[in-house]
Each structure stands twice: as structure tokens, then as C-alpha cells.
Image: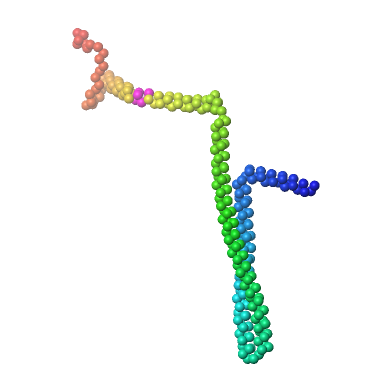
Amino acid sequence: MFGRLMNLVRGFFGLFVSGLEKANPRAMLESEMLAFQEAVGQYNTNLAKQAGMVERLKGQIASQKKQLDLLTARVTANMASKNMEEAGRCALQAKQLKQDLTENEEQLKGGEEMYQNLNRQRDVYVREAQRKIEAIKQKLSKAEMAEAQAKLAEMASSTAFNLSGTGANLGRLEENLDNRIAEASGKARVAQDSMKGGGWVVKEEEQKALEAQALAEFSASMGLPGPAKTEEAAPAPKDLGPSESVKA
């Protein structure tokens, strides 16, 4: 019963995780990248321990070789001096040391091979993980682009453009703006045409002629000398009909 319950819980948990992966794959990728970095860091720590053991063995072997050389020399010296008891004791120590040295050299060889294999395995694992991560990144980008294009296509195919709604409103707004532009352009043209006609110039000349005539009549009535005539010829009077001489 307990086993069935655990299977059910694991099944629900698996469905929950699967739903999260599908809903947010980028977050899942970031989590996997973080876990990958942690795993590589832990692996490097263990690899460093293996390398440290190899280095300790190398140092121990080098020390044992020096001791073996020293014992060998002592055995030779004691034998030369006929000190067989001391020579035998040193020879026994040299024998035991040589056995230890042989074992350590074999252990060093195995440790070095293990370190090299672990190092290569780490490099292969890292390269493969990086390749997969880059491939997933590219697929994720392609999936996001494809989904965005699919949404746009779905919107374009399912949206009903009603001319009596937004489209018609925009059309009327554009038409009103065109009418305003045309009306303003017409007013500007009328103003320009009236300026070109020169009507205001004629009115200004007539006003000056009336002012000069009024000044001459005022001077004559007051017995004052008339205003000096300018060199500029006065405008010819308008033809109002036959003159008095013609009438006579």
C-alpha cells in the first residue's frame, strides 16, 4: 500500500515537473546550467584530491629511493669492514624498503592513470554538456520565433475586420482630415490671388488724390498758397464725359 502511494506521489510530481518544463523551458535550462556548473565544480574538487594523492606518492617514492640508496651504501660499508651483523640488519631494512617502494610505484602508476582518465572524462563530459546546452538554446530560440509567427498568423486568420467598426471610423477620420487640408489650401490660394490683383494699390492712390484735392480746396478758401507740386505727374483724371469746350 505504501509503495503504491509513493508511486502515485512520484507520478504526480513527475507531471508537475513536466508541466513546469513545458511552461517555462528557459528557466529549466538555466537551472540545468547551474546544476552542471555545480557538478563540474564538485568533480574538479575530487580530481584535485586525486592529483594530491599522486603528488604525495611521488614525494614518498623519492624519499624511499634516497633511503634505499643510503641503506645500500651502509650494507656495502659494513660488509667491507667485516661487520656482518650490522650489514645484515641494514640489508633487511633495505629489502623491506624496496618492497614498499615497489608497492608505492605500482600505486603511483595506477593513481596517475586514474587521474588522467578522470581528467579526460571530465573534458568529454564538459564538451558534451556545452554542446547540448548550445543546441537547446538554439532550439529554444527557434521555438519562440515559430510560436510568435504562429500567433501572428492565427490572429491574422481569425480576426474579422468589420468595415462598419474600427476600419470605417479610421476611414471617416482620414476623410475629415483631407477635407480640412483642402479647405485650408483653398483659403490660402484665395488670399494669394487677392494680393496679386493689386486692388489695394488702386485704393491707396485714390485716397492720396482725394487728400491732395481737399488740401488744395482748403488752401484756396483760406487764401493760402497752394501746396507745391511734386515732379511726379499726378494721375490722369478719369474720363467723365465730353469737356465744356466740346459742349460749347
Q: Residue at x 59, y 56 (%)?
A: 125
Q: Is residue 245 left or right of residue 151?
A: left
Q: Residue at x 66, y 89 (%)?
A: 84
Tell me which corner region of the image, top left, top right, bottom left or bottom right, holds residue 71.
Answer: bottom right
Residue 245 location, x and y as percent?
19, 11
The total of numbered circles placed on residues is 0
Is residue 207 visible in this depiction of the protein? no
Tell me if residue 166 comes above or below residue 27 in the rendering: above
Q: Residue at x 63, y 60 (%)?
A: 43
Tell me if residue 223 comes above or below residue 65 in the rendering: above
Task: Tell whether position 110 is magenta.
Answer: no
Residue 72 location, x and y as percent?
62, 83
Q: Residue furthest top?
A: 248
Q: Which region of the structure is painted magenta?
A: 190-195
Which image quarter is the C terminus in? top left
Judging depth in this view, the residue of 27 and 238 nearest the camera is 27
Tell me if residue 209 comes above or below residue 45 in the rendering: above
Judging depth in this view, the residue of 230 and 190 nearest the camera is 190
Tell me which corner region of the image, top left, top right, bottom left or bottom right, holds residue 228.
Answer: top left
Residue 184 location, x and y as percent?
42, 26
Is residue 231 visible in this depiction of the protein? yes
Q: Residue at x 61, y 55 (%)?
A: 36
Judging depth in this view, the residue of 185 and 196 nearest the camera is 185
Task: Tell whether position 191 is magenta.
Answer: yes
Label the magenta part by its dominant secondary structure.
helix
